[in-house]
Image (cartoon, coloured by chain):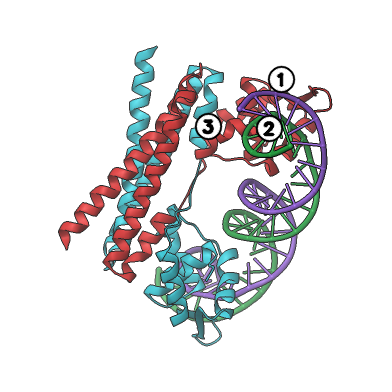
Chain colours: A red, B cyan, C purple, D green
Amino acid sequence: MDLSPTGRVILGVLAVEPRSGYDIKALTDKSTRFFWAASYGQIYPELKRLSDRGLIEGSDESHGSRKRTVYRITREGRKALAEWLGTPEQVHELRDEGLLKLFFAAAQGNDAVTAAIREKRDAHASALAELREIEPYAQSAERVGPAEVLGYGLAYNEFAIRWCEETLERLNKEN
Amino acid sequence: MDLSPTGRVILGVLAVEPRSGYDIKALTDKSTRFFWAASYGQIYPELKRLSDRGLIEGSDESHGSRKRTVYRITREGRKALAEWLGTPEQVHELRDEGLLKLFFAAAQGNDAVTAAIREKRDAHASALAELREIEPYAQSAERVGPAEVLGYGLAYNEFAIRWCEETLERLNKEN
DNA sequence: CTGCACATGTAAACGGTTACATGATTGA
DNA sequence: TCAATCATGTAACCGTTTACATGTGCAG
């Protein structure tokens, strides 16, 4: 059925309940953002494409002169979503500037190495704090997925912080 | 000094020793690939740009009619690299299709959830095996960075596998 | 003599972000 | 009345991947 990455996110979101493009952006910003982001520049054109292919259906819900189009997933759309979920495909891409700096920092001396690790630790600490703010929101969801995924986000950042601290300690001992 | 992402990788690699575009690709495939990939389509044009800006210098080392241009980093290039390493910037992007599936799987039922987690676990297990193959290569490096970064990659995948297994167990108990 | 590793490069397509443009409604 | 939020959309740009094109040198 061939869904684009953003198309998958949209179908997945709409499978739960109908939403407008604006709603989709708001929801993904509070949930999938940490492992799969989406911007308006992708969402609106993709809504049109999915609609053209009959995977979703828009209905006008404007209030007065305030425009609003709410999209719902179609039978065809659910089929496409299920098809994607059924494939074992597992794209996994990481772009971690902290690791890149660490990789090259050795050439700059020990201080650069420890600085890189400390900055990485702090970045993960900020991310952790952000996720904790979302926590109550995700746990209120009646479904199983979101809470687990948020839990992964928390655990991942905790892991990274721990790793940074252990590595700093180890490097400290070695010198 | 304003370096592009691929420019940083190239400068970092060349700071250790001079290399050709082909060498850079081969090295990054065995090292930074897991957290910062680079393809020929980026490397060759970027080498030209960095050279135009005086951050690197190419010298012809063709053997007979077999072309080969080896680039070395310049003083200016080292300055630019140090400048980048000195900024606290920490781009961190994750695209994890397994988590995305897990997030949406609940709507498909419990089997879809456990299937998504199992597939994620298997994907991390493959990644772990790949990294273990590289291990001897990274540890032979005289510098500090690479071994630490590889260690992170191993630890990260081990963490993810553990998380998947614990979550499977917990979900199993709950039903 | 064949296949693999070495080696360089370009073009097209893709996916995504950012900035911009526009305007309505609501609550403080 | 002013700021925040709701709401939709486009255009320009950026970085990246993929596929293609081309050819050399060496080892088995």
Question: Left of B81 or right of it: where is B139?
Answer: left
Residue found at x 28% / y 63%: B144
**Element on which disc 1 rests:** helix
Q: Is residue B26 above or below residue B93?
A: below
Query: Residue at label 2?
Result: A22
Asked if labels 1 and 3 touch by Cβ distance under 8 angstroms, the answer is no
Q: Residue furthest toward the top? A: B175
Q: Earlier in the sequence, mark 3 or mark 2?
A: 2
Res C5 quadrant in image: bottom left
The kind of secondary structure element at disc 3 is loop
Residue at mark 3 to residue at mark 1: CA–CA distance: 25 Å
Q: Is residue B3 above or below residue B156?
A: below
- Foreground: A152 or B44? A152
**Residue B158: percent from the left, percent from the top?**
32, 40
Query: Subunit of mark 2?
Result: A
Residue B138 in sight from this viewpoint: no
